[in-house]
Image (spheres, rainbow, N blue to C red):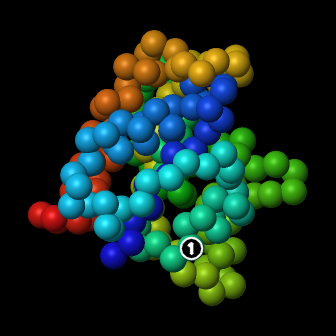
C-alpha cells in the first residue's frame, strides 16, 4: 500500500500555509514504522496538477486551508465531492473533483474516492503576507495533525 499525505498552500500567505504546518506536525510525531508506506510532501498547486500528484497512490490525505465563513481553527474532514468551493481552479484549470474524474476517465491509477480524505482548517486570513498562521489556526494544527494520524491508523491497521 502506498499512502500520500500532501500539505497544500502558500508558505508566505498567513493561514494558507496551514497545510504545511499540519504536515510538519505529522512528520514530527508519525511512527517510524509507517515511513516506508506513508510519503509526506508539500505542494502549492491545485486542480489538474494536484490530481497528477495523486497518481500511483492507494490512499491520500490532502491538508489545506478552507474558507467557509466558519469559526477560524475549525477542522473539517471532507471527500473531494464535498469541497464547497472552486477557488483552487484558475480559468485554465479545474477543481479537484473534476480533475479526478478526468484522470480516471483517461485511465490514470488514482485512489478511490473513499481513500481520499481532505483535512481542512478554517482560515481567518489567507491574503496577508506572513510566515505564521493566525492564532486560532495555529492552535488547530495539533488537532488536525491528530486527525491525520487517526485516518492513517485506520488505513494501516496495527503497523
- In the rendered image, residue 53, in percent from the top left (x then y), is placed at 60, 64
Percent x, y of residue 90: 82, 48
Task: Tell me if I can see residue 117 in this picture.
Answer: yes
Image location (x, y in percent) of residue 119: 43, 44
Q: Quadrant of residue 4?
A: bottom left
Give the residue pinned by disc 1.
55
Task: Give the tally of numbered discs.
Answer: 1
11 to 72, vertically: above or below: below
Q: Quadrant of the N terminus?
A: bottom left
Q: Callout 1: helix, strand or loop?
A: loop
Q: Residue sitting at 71 percent across and 63 percent down?
A: 48
Camera sees residue 76: no
Q: Quadrant of residue 131?
A: top right
* Identity of the residue furthest to the left in this view: 158
Q: Where is residue 116? Give x, y as percent.
A: 45, 61
Say which residue appears at 51% left-offset and 38% top-offset: 19
Q: Looking at the figure, which quarter contains the C terminus?
A: bottom left
Q: Is residue 62 left or right of residue 97?
A: left
- Residue 103 falls left or right of residue 144: right
Amino acid at each position: 500500500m502506498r499512502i500520500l499525505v500532501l500539505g497544500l498552500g502558500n508558505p508566505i500567505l498567513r493561514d494558507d500555509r496551514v497545510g504545511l504546518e499540519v504536515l510538519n506536525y505529522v512528520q514530527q510525531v508519525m511512527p517510524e514504522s509507517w515511513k516506508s508506506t506513508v510519503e509526506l510532501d508539500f505542494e502549492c498547486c491545485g486542480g489538474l496538477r494536484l490530481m497528477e500528484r495523486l497518481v500511483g497512490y492507494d490512499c491520500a490525505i490532502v491538508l489545506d486551508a478552507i474558507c467557509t465563513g466558519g469559526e477560524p481553527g475549525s477542522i473539517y474532514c471532507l471527500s473531494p465531492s464535498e469541497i464547497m468551493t472552486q477557488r483552487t481552479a484558475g480559468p485554465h484549470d479545474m477543481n479537484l473533483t473534476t480533475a479526478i474524474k478526468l484522470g480516471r476517465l483517461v485511465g490514470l491509477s488514482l485512489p478511490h474516492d473513499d481513500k481520499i480524505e481532505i483535512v481542512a482548517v478554517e482560515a481567518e486570513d489567507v491574503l496577508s503576507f506572513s510566515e505564521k498562521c493566525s492564532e486560532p489556526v495555529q492552535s488547530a494544527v495539533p488537532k488536525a495533525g491528530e486527525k491525520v494520524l487517526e485516518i492513517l491508523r485506520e488505513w494501516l491497521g496495527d503497523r
